[in-house]
Image (cartoon, rainbow, N blue to C red):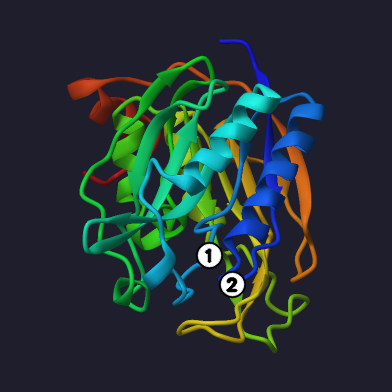
């Protein structure tokens, strides 16, 4: 497949302010399109903020008004959009992600599986994994800790299902007195991203929001960006700036590669690359 540009929309998300957050998401989508990106990846729970309690009463279904706002932006600027939203489904809320095509159609809809314990007080656990064959390659949209080192089995399964690109809305937060010079943020994510990228020749992109968390169990913590893109072979394609005010768009080149193997041939292919797992 030919390559393309992907935008990492490291967006300011304000707790409990969905209209303002969605407006910023639309503006970031426009900027990514202007810079020649075919897809833009936006953060986790970008409408309300991760674990913000306001979502309990105000979350919307998917499709619904919040996904419609993003679909409008995808259509207006002719670009693929990956975004995290809080989803109401009956009496449950989910930490969800969607992939929109340039016509605004929802192509993929994922519900986060590896939710933190404090997150499960609000969000139910997702129950399915899917990939979609698109002009971007075969795409999956796991959310944040779905790609964490201790839960990277989710990423392994998606890659074994044929994913060539993992586009992951995220929300990476630190305590207020975190010292980035002493303990640079990202070391917890890089090994997992690199393992998946190296074993399966995939590109893994995680995009975090920035801003102060103003509600929920982590009230007072700081979302600090540091969005990360890792390409086949484990090459770091981008590592975003750090800080509550580090709102920015990063642009990387993505070249999807053919899957290393499929089905029962996968085990031998991974073993040849040094993988000892199941």
Q: Quadrant of residue 35?
A: top right
Q: Quadrant of residue 17?
A: bottom right
Where does the image place residue 233, in percent across and percent down from the top left?
A: 57, 34
Residue placed furthest toward the left = 264
Choose between 65 and 120: the one closer to the eye: 65
Is any part of residue 228 visible from this angle? Answer: yes
In the image, what residue occupies the spot 34% across and 65% down? 115
- Secondary structure at badge 2 equals loop
In the image, what residue occupies the spot 54% across and 66% down? 49
- Secondary structure at badge 1 equals loop
Residue 29 in the image: above or below residue 79: below
From the image, tell me which residue sits under label 2: 15
Residue 56 in the image: above or below residue 143: below
From the image, tell me which residue sits under label 1: 48
Quarter of the C terminus within the rendering: top left
Residue 230 in the image: above or below residue 266: below
Q: Is residue 134 left or right of residue 3?
A: left
Where does the image place residue 126, in percent across and percent down from the top left?
A: 26, 53
Q: Quadrant of residue 210?
A: bottom right
Q: Are marks 2 and 1 in contact (CB under 8 Å)?
A: yes
């Amino acid at each position: 497949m030919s390559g393309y540009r992907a935008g990492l929309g490291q967006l300011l998300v304000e707790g409990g302010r969905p209209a303002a957050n969605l407006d910023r998401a639309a503006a970031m989508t426009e900027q990514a399109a202007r810079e020649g990106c075919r897809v833009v990846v936006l953060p986790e729970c970008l409408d309300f903020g991760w674990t913000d309690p306001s979502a309990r009463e105000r979350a919307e279904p998917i499709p619904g008004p919040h996904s419609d706002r993003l679909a409008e932006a995808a259509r207006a600027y002719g670009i693929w959009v990956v975004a995290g939203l809080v989803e109401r489904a009956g009496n449950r809320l989910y930490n969800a992600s969607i992939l929109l095509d340039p016509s605004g159609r929802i192509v993929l809809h994922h519900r986060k599986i590896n939710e933190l314990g404090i997150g499960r007080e609000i969000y139910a656990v997702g129950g399915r994994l899917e990939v979609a064959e698109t002009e971007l390659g075969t795409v999956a949209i796991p959310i944040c800790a779905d790609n964490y080192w201790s839960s990277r089995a989710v990423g392994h399964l998606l890659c074994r299902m044929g994913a060539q690109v993992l586009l992951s809305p995220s929300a990476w937060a630190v305590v207020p007195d975190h010292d980035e010079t002493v303990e640079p943020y990202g070391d917890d994510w890089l090994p997992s991203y690199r393992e998946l990228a190296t074993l399966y020749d995939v590109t893994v992109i995680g995009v975090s929001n920035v801003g102060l968390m103003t509600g929920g169990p982590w009230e007072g913590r700081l979302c600090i960006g540091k969005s990360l893109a890792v390409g086949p072979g484990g090459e770091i394609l981008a590592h975003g700036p750090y800080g509550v005010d580090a709102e920015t768009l990063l642009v990387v080149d993505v070249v999807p590669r053919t899957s290393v193997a499929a089905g029962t041939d996968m085990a031998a292919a991974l073993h040849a690359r040094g993988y000892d797992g199941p």
